[in-house]
């Protein structure tokens, strides 16, 4: 009886079976095909978790048919908690690797800060500091003609004395 049942079943070739499992003919069969009714849509892709939503994912991966918010097709974000840090970002003078090339502040010239002895907001060129952030007592503007007197600086109003 078993022989009779087997004799009545048609055998399906490998090629026929593959074509039956790939309805759109894109070469990706069920269940791996994300849309077996559309030949332009194939297998699921690898996506990278983009926690800071800057368009670049970090090291976390997931596989899916369509990207959700918070994932990217591009990886390489070296600080996925900071949206200003990603491959190709502009470097800033902040002691951080903003462009993910492994070097902090490369190509950035730090500003010159001027010591302000009298606290009027103006320093002199006699004592300077070149760094990303000013040290205590340093300001961004020079031009103080008397750094011992806070009433004398480039904003001091002078009047003729007749």
Image: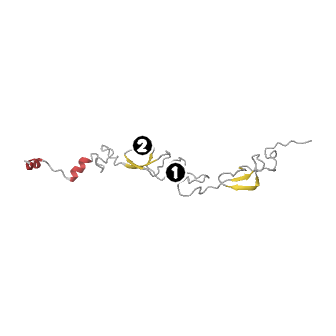
Residue ID for mark 2: 68
Which residue in the rendered view is the most extreme toward the right? 162
Which residue in the rendered view is the most extreme toward the front? 136
Q: Is residue 65 rendered to the left or right of residue 160?
A: left
**What residue is at 73 percent from the left and 52 percent from the top?**
114
> For the residue labelled by badge 2, is the local secondary structure a helix, a strand or a loop?
loop
Q: Is residue 4 rendered to the left or right of residue 112?
A: left
Q: Nearer the viewer, mark 1 or mark 2?
A: 1
Cβ atoms under marks 1 and 2 closer than 8 Å: no
Indicate the position of residue 121 as horizontal and vertical percent values: 75, 46
**Label 2 crowding class (10 Å Cα cut-off): few <14, some 14-19, many 20+?**
few
Label 1, label 2: how far apart the Cα atoms are = 20 Å
- 155 or 59, nearer to the observer: 59
- 126 or 18, nearer to the observer: 126
Q: Is residue 141 rendered to the left or right of residue 12?
A: right
Indicate the position of residue 11 as horizontal and vertical percent values: 15, 50
Can you tell which mark lies on residue 152?
none
**What residue is at 77 percent from the left and 50 percent from the top?**
117
Indicate the position of residue 45 as horizontal and vertical percent values: 38, 49
> For the residue labelled by badge 1, is the local secondary structure a helix, a strand or a loop?
loop
**Scheme by which the image is coloured:** secondary structure
**Label 1 crowding class (10 Å Cα cut-off): few <14, some 14-19, many 20+?**
many
**What residue is at 40 percent from the left and 48 percent from the top?**
62
Indicate the position of residue 129 as horizontal and vertical percent values: 70, 55
**What residue is at 24 percent from the left and 50 percent from the top?**
18
Residue ID for mark 1: 79
Which of the two labelled residues, at mark 1 and mark 2, occupies the earlier sequence position?
2
- 158 or 19, nearer to the observer: 158
Q: Quadrant of the C terminus?
A: top right
Q: How many marks?
A: 2
């Amino acid at each position: 009886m078993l022989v009779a049942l087997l004799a009545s079943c048609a055998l399906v070739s490998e090629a026929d079976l593959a074509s039956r499992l790939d309805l759109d003919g894109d070469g990706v069969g069920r269940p791996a095909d994300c849309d077996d009714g559309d030949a332009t849509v194939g297998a699921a892709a690898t996506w990278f978790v983009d926690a800071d939503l800057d368009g670049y994912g970090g090291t976390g991966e997931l596989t899916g048919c369509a990207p959700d918010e918070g994932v990217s097709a591009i990886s390489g974000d070296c600080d996925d908690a900071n949206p200003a840090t990603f491959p190709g970002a502009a470097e800033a003078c902040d002691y951080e690797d903003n462009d993910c090339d492994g070097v902090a502040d490369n190509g950035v010239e730090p500003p010159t800060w001027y010591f302000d002895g009298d606290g009027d907001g103006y320093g002199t060129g006699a004592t300077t500091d070149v760094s990303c952030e000013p040290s205590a007592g340093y300001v961004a503007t020079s031009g103080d003609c008397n750094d011992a007197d806070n009433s004398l600086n480039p904003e001091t109003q002078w009047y003729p004395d007749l």
